Image: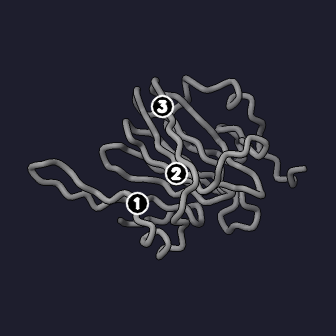
Amino acid sequence: MKFVPTAVSGAFVVEVDARSDERGLFARTFDAKSFADHGLVPVYLQCNVSQNHKRGTLRGMHYQADPRPEIKLVRATRGRVFDVALDLRRDSPTYLNWASVELDAARHNAFYIPAGCAHGFLTLEDDCELFYQMSEVYVPELARGVRWDDPAFAIAWPFTPSVISERDAALENYSQEPAP
């Protein structure tokens, strides 16, 4: 595996070393020791799947607040998505920066998103599925989000979403004031 740094401190694109022969393909997609050797969390407490039927579906920008922030390891298991990590850690050298990667099921790549970062994605084709490994269990009262199109972040989405939940569409712009 190869860990490629991004514009967000502590966020990495995880590329696999796939081997192909007449039988097909084999690739290691996760190795706890390799993750630990790179200073990344090697244990996940929860896994989730996100199925998305239509191209142009946007989910995000979500995060879980203290005291149980989530680290996410996200990969496309079907289709392609434009995946984004947004740094909301006030003490980070990349505070308010974002990084993106095209997650592609055919490439088997993943995105490691550190705690304190919001996450979202836009489907680039119909019938996409994402698999999330989470460092924390979901705590509904700690669930937070910011607008995907907040001008404070200027995320360069490849196109305007055509499908977005009412909840995500109603998220407010980010406030740099400490949360209550």
Count residues near mark 3 (Cα–Cα under 10 Å), then give few for <14, some for 14-19, many for 20+.
Answer: few
Q: Residue at x 60, y 57 (%)?
A: 135
Say if mark 2 contacts mark 1, CB within 8 Å: yes
Residue 133 disc label: 2
- Disc 3 marks a residue whose amino acid type is Gln
Count residues near mark 1 (Cα–Cα under 10 Å), then give few for <14, some for 14-19, many for 20+.
Answer: some
Compared with 54, 122 (above or below) is below
Q: What SS does tag 1 mark?
A: loop
Q: Which residue is mark 3?
A: 51
- Disc 2 marks a residue whose amino acid type is Gln
Q: Is residue 77 left or right of residue 94?
A: left
Alpha-carbon span between mark 3 and mark 1: 22 Å
- Disc 1 marks a residue whose amino acid type is Phe
Q: What SS does tag 3 mark?
A: strand
Asked which quadrant contains residue 97, the reply is bottom right
Query: For the view shown, which residue lies furthest in the right direction?
Result: 180
Q: Which residue is mark 1?
A: 30
Residue 130 disc label: none
Q: Residue at x 34, y 50 (%)?
A: 108
